[in-house]
Image (cartoon, rainbow, N blue to C red):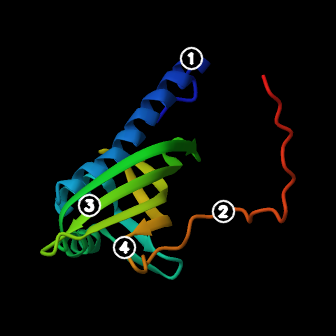
Amino acid sequence: MPDESLSSLQRAVWELQQRVQITETLINYCVHVDRNDPVALSELVFAEDGCFELGARYAVVGRENLQKMFAKTLAVFSATSHHLSNVRITFTGDTTAHTTAHVYAWHLTQPEGRRVDLWGRYEDQLVLGAKGWRIASRRLSAAGSDGWDKPPFQGVERLANPIDPPAPVITKR
């Protein structure tokens, strides 16, 4: 947590350090999911009372329940590969932050070996504690999927397409 007397340069350096640490927390989620390690995932990524929202009405709350959820969810896959991009971090205080990041998640079911792909967005609230940044709340929204009939996530927010949009003028160069 920065001291109020920090210069603007010191504050900027502190904020850059925090951005790196927050990004590492988000990447650690992917690493521990892909390693099939629910214990490390719940302890090293989520806050003690962290929550994973399942749509607008349900959530899994607390490390013990998160550990159980991840163990149950990951048990149906023989392999996964999660890829994070477009990370945006907004500090809401010295010890709190809001992030969004896009995810592409590849899954291989067992025993049949069916491929399941998901494209989506994580929206997270993070808190800074004694052991670093942890996710206090995560919401996954789905932009699309392949091999998954009805993903249990809300759709990614997207503006409606315009009705009969005008065509641009195209010139030869």
Q: Label 4 amino acid? A: Val
Which of disc 1 and disc 3 is earlier in sequence? Answer: 1
Q: Is the C terminus in the top left, top right, bottom left or bottom right quadrant? A: top right
Give the number of the mark in front: 3 or 1: 3
Q: Which numbered tag is attached to residue 42?
A: 3
Q: Which numbered tag is attached to residue 61?
A: 4
Q: Which residue is mark 2?
A: 158
- The structure residue drawn at horizontal position 29% and vertical position 45%, both measured from the top left corner, is 131
* Quarter occupied by residue 169: top right
- In space, the residues marked 3 and 2 are separated at their CA atoms by 31 Å
Question: Dot 1 lies on which element?
Answer: helix
Categorize mark 1 by other alpha carbons within 10 Å: few (<14), some (14-19), many (20+). Answer: few
Residue 130 visible in the displayed image: no
- The structure residue drawn at horizontal position 53% and vertical position 73%, both measured from the top left corner, is 154
Instruction: Report if the CB atoms under discs 3 and 2 are less than 8 Å apart.
Output: no
Which of disc 1 and disc 4 is earlier in sequence? Answer: 1
What is the total number of numbered labels drawn onto the structure image?
Answer: 4
Q: Nearer the viewer, residue 160 or 134?
A: 160
Which of disc 2 and disc 4 is earlier in sequence? Answer: 4
Q: In the figure, 67 relative to 173: above or below?
A: below
Q: In the figure, 151 relative to 31: above or below?
A: below
- In space, the residues marked 2 and 1 are separated at their CA atoms by 37 Å
- The structure residue drawn at horizontal position 57% and vertical position 43%, both measured from the top left corner, is 91
- The structure residue drawn at horizontal position 43% and vertical position 67%, both measured from the top left corner, is 145
Q: Which residue is mark 1?
A: 9
